[in-house]
Image (cartoon, helix red, strand yellow):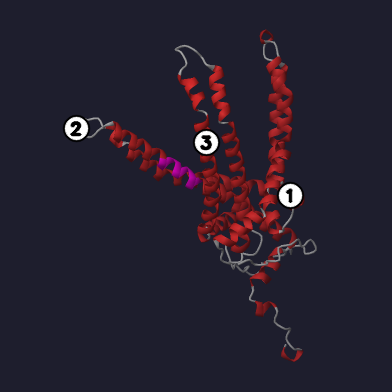
Amino acid sequence: MSHNTGWGQHPGQPAPQWGGGWMPPSAPKPGVIPLQPLTAGEILGGAFSTFGRHWKTLVGVMFAAQGIGLLLVAAAIVLTVVAAQSRFSDVADLAPGESGGGAWAALLLAFAPAGALLLVTMTLSAAVTSALCPAVVQEAVLGRPTTFGVMWRRSWSRLPSVLGTLLLTGLIAGGPMLALYAICIPLIITAPAHSGPPAALFVLLLGLLSCVPLSIWLMTRLSLAPAAAVCEGLGPVAALRRSSQLVKDGWWRVFGNTMLAYIVAAAVGYFIQMPFGFVGMVGLIPYFGDVSGENPDVGSLIAGVVVYVVSVLAGIMVSMVFQYGFPQLALALLYVDQRMRKENLAAVLIASAAPAEAVFAPAPHPDQV
């Protein structure tokens, strides 16, 4: 079921400022976070809690999106292998010492469509995750349940806008680097070999040193755009402007919490992969022979290699769900936090979390006060 949480813009409701020595009462916590400006620990804890409470929905939607894409890529690879039999033969029939550059180039070119499809699939999977996580967080902060069907439809309904924000962010943040490469690389390639390192190489290195900080600043400034596109129903350009507005005056805080979320995700992802790698190594034990020193047969070796490869790939897929999903959950919570700080979104969420009888209860009669 879908809930209207009233998450539209509320620019006329500034967040309250607490001063003096007085502390406000404890904020209500109907879901994964207290409805007040969040600390770094509360953001990370809220992301963990969201993943723990809604892991079935998160894993289900992400695996479904990735599975569809991987099936399409696998089908494209099989069709390419069948269609490129002659090119495989050309490579296999190369004489000893013959480089066969043209044959190898033709074979690689045959797989270019499958590679392009893989790139498109990875981009769409990333966009689905970027649309899914804010949708789940929107319910998790109020303690509401989620279902696979509702989140699947919600993710795909906002996919065009979220995909637009990701592509535009990549172009905006990576634009200076792309322009630098487009100018310097041709100059480096065409420079005379006997003249030493070309000046364009030094220009490229200095330009990269300048562009990297700018790209990081831009990516952070626009990092809340997917959450804005999902929670407020904005288009790509409007979502980018909204993110820039929310991150303004809080860039270092958003950047620091984002980096912390990615570091935590990488560390946890590594530990997730460890047991899968251990299982794979167990499958390779027959390769080293038994205690009597006998070598395993070819069938045992092939089976061990298959177990190892499947185990490692399974570990990578499972860990990638967390490694990509966790930072997106943290970014969605940062979006909520910035709105609570700037727009007093907490008051709107508290009203949304309260029972309908309490929200719409009539004001008490003067004689009852």
In the picture of the structure, the residue carrying the numbered disc 1 is: 236
Q: Amino acid at mark 3?
A: Leu
Q: Amino acid at mark 2?
A: Ser
- 337 and 146: which is toward the camera: 146
Near mark 2 (Cα within 10 A), the count class, few <14, some 14-19 or many ≥20, is few
Circle 2 or circle 1, nearest the eye: 1
First reached walking from the N terminus: tag 2 or tag 1: 1
Q: What is the magenta range?
A: 310-319
Local secondary structure at mark 2: loop
Q: Residue at x 53, y 33 (%)?
A: 80
Task: Give the label on residue 51, or none.
Answer: none
Left or right: residue 307 versus residue 342 is left
Above or below — where is 346 with respect to 194? below
Q: Quadrant of residue 37?
A: bottom right
Expressed as whole percent of the image width and height from the top left, the position of residue 180 reads 73, 28
Local secondary structure at mark 1: helix
**Numbered disc total:** 3
Task: Give the label on residue 79, or none.
Answer: 3
Using the rendered image of the protein, determine whether residue 264 is visible from the camera's viewpoint: no
Expressed as whole percent of the image width and height from the top left, the position of residue 221 reads 72, 46
Expressed as whole percent of the image width and height from the top left, the position of residue 257 reads 62, 49
Q: Is residue 318 magenta?
A: yes
Q: Residue at x 71, y 31 (%)?
A: 178
In the picture of the structure, the residue carrying the numbered disc 2 is: 292
Q: Quadrant of residue 309?
A: top left
